[in-house]
Image (tube, helix red, strand yellow):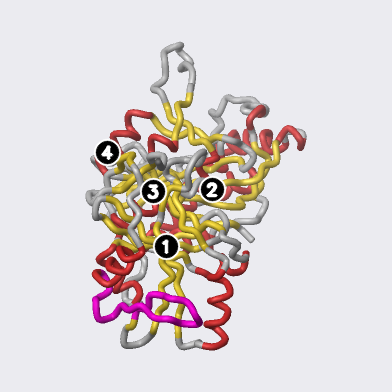
């Protein structure tokens, strides 16, 4: 008997139960139901019995397999279809001999009548070579399809997968239905203008933030505040605050929760994090507030920007001294000495990649672990916080967007 794994129901809730793969005839009937009975047929092409979808513009060969749990000892949210070796030969021969056909690797997920389709965009799989290998998909990908209709992402290996809710499959294959989340487009635009791949010297950034009247310019954790400064400026200068609005510092409106980003139109929250790329963890938020936020707004985004770091201790604490002298020159009442905060000061950073992980009711329990933050300076206990394990940035059950500087 198969091991139980995560399953998505009609209401997008998650249960742990047995897989319910369709039979070959069940696959055919599901495709006929959602694509139109007259549009779907079985044909013999290049000596293979395949399913073909015909619309007015193209003929699409659907090489369809059931999506099932990968099996022990893999996580119960990890699923796959098998890619037989003959797919590679078949696709190459189609390209040479029958170019009028398009070929898709289609996965079909089924549980208690709920069906979600997945288009494993074949290009990268073909480049790596098919040797009865697996193409992976995750519980959260199916959850996203149930939520948005069409969900596209690039996994950690560079493969593109598109998860499609059943009632959107025909529109998708007809080219009339693209992924709908324009927030990803905004982050692409922001990343394009962000100084990835450049060494940013602490004193230069501190002076820049001061001259542009950023309220947090004197903070010693300058790299994280620079990220928030640039994000805030981007949302204002590009007039996108109706879609995403920086609400950190003093920008909060009445009713805003204590996070960095309010995604207005989509009605949820997120937080910006700048983190040393070599660190295994980065602190998250108060447990109670985060869990309440996820249940109230259905999801939460951690937007994490990772950087390489040069420690100021390796440079004679020049950034520490420059920062303290500069603050003193602006504010004569500043009473810290020139070595204040020297032990944790970053001399310079170079941002290299960013990741968005989505926490929702389907996945957040697995994504975060308790962070023992210790005591407040007065000895009282701090509110318990979650700690973000950086392994989640490689986990495709949580990641919904990636960008790497190349």
- The reply to whether the magenta stretch includes residue 311 is no
Q: Mark 3 vs mark 2: which is more N-terminal? A: 3
Which of the two labelled residues, at mark 2 and mark 1, occupies the earlier sequence position? 1
Assess whether mark 4 and mark 1 are in contact (beta carbons under 8 angstroms): no
Nearest-to-viewer mark from 3 and 1: 1
Residue under circle 2?
A: 305
Quick one: 173 or 147, which is closer to the camera? 173
Q: Of label 3 and label 1, which has the lower sequence position?
A: 1
Looking at the rendered image, the quarter that the N terminus falls into is: top left
Q: Which residue is mark 1?
A: 65
Read off the residue under disc 4: 295
Q: Name the foreground residue: 215 vs 241.
A: 241
Whole-number angstrom distance, CA of label 3 to CA of label 1: 17 Å
> Left or right of 64: which side holds 169?
left
Tell me the distance, in whole angstroms, between the alpha carbons under discs 2 and 1: 37 Å
Task: Say which of marks 2 and 4 sits in front.
Answer: 4
N-terminal of the pair, mark 3 or mark 4, is: 3
Task: Residue at 55% x, 29% y: name it.
Answer: 334
Magenta span: predominant SS is strand
Q: Nearer the viewer, mark 3 or mark 2?
A: 3
From the viewer's side, name the closer residue of 336 and 174. 174
Q: Residue at x 49, y 80 (%)?
A: 47
Residue 358 is situated, as x and y percent measured from the top left of the image, at 40, 47
Crowding near the residue tagged with mark 2, few <14, some 14–19, many ≥20 C-alpha atoms within 10 Å = many
Q: Which residue is mark 3?
A: 139
């Amino acid at each position: 008997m198969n091991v139980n794994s995560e399953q998505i129901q009609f209401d997008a809730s998650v249960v742990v139960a047995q897989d319910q793969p369709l039979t070959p005839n069940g696959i055919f009937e599901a495709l006929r139901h959602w694509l139109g009975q007259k549009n779907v047929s079985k044909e013999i092409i290049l000596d293979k019995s395949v399913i073909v979808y015909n619309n007015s513009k193209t003929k699409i060969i659907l090489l369809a397999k059931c999506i099932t749990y990968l099996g022990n000892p893999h996580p119960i949210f990890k699923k796959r279809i098998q890619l037989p070796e003959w797919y590679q030969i078949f696709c190459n021969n189609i390209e040479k001999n029958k170019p009028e056909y398009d070929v898709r690797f289609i996965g079909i997920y089924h549980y208690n009548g709920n069906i979600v389709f997945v288009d494993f965009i074949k290009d990268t799989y073909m480049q790596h070579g098919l040797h009865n290998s697996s193409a992976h998909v995750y519980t959260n990908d199916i959850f996203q399809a149930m939520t948005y209709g069409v969900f596209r992402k690039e996994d950690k290996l560079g493969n593109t997968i598109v998860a499609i809710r059943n009632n959107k499959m025909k529109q998708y294959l007809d080219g009339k239905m693209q992924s709908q989340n324009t927030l990803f487009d905004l982050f692409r635009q922001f990343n394009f203008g962000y100084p990835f791949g450049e060494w940013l010297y602490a004193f230069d950034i501190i002076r820049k933030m001061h001259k542009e009247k950023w309220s947090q310019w004197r903070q010693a954790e300058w790299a994280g505040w620079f990220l928030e400064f640039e994000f805030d400026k981007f949302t204002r200068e590009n007039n996108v605050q109706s879609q995403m609005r920086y609400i950190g510092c003093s920008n909060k409106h009445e009713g805003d929760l204590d996070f960095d980003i309010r995604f207005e139109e989509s009605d949820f929250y997120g937080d910006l994090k700048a983190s040393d790329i070599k660190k295994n963890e980065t602190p998250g938020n108060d447990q109670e507030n985060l869990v309440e936020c996820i249940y109230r707004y259905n999801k939460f985004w951690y937007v994490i920007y990772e950087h390489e770091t040069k420690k100021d201790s390796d440079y004679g604490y020049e950034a520490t001294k420059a920062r303290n002298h500069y603050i003193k020159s602006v504010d004569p009442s500043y009473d810290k000495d020139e070595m204040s905060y020297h032990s944790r000061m970053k001399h310079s950073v170079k941002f290299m990649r960013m990741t968005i992980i989505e926490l929702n009711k389907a996945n957040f329990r697995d994504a975060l672990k308790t962070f023992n933050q210790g005591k407040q300076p007065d000895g009282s206990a701090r509110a318990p916080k979650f700690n973000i394990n950086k392994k989640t940035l490689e986990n495709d059950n949580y990641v919904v967007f990636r960008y790497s500087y190349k």
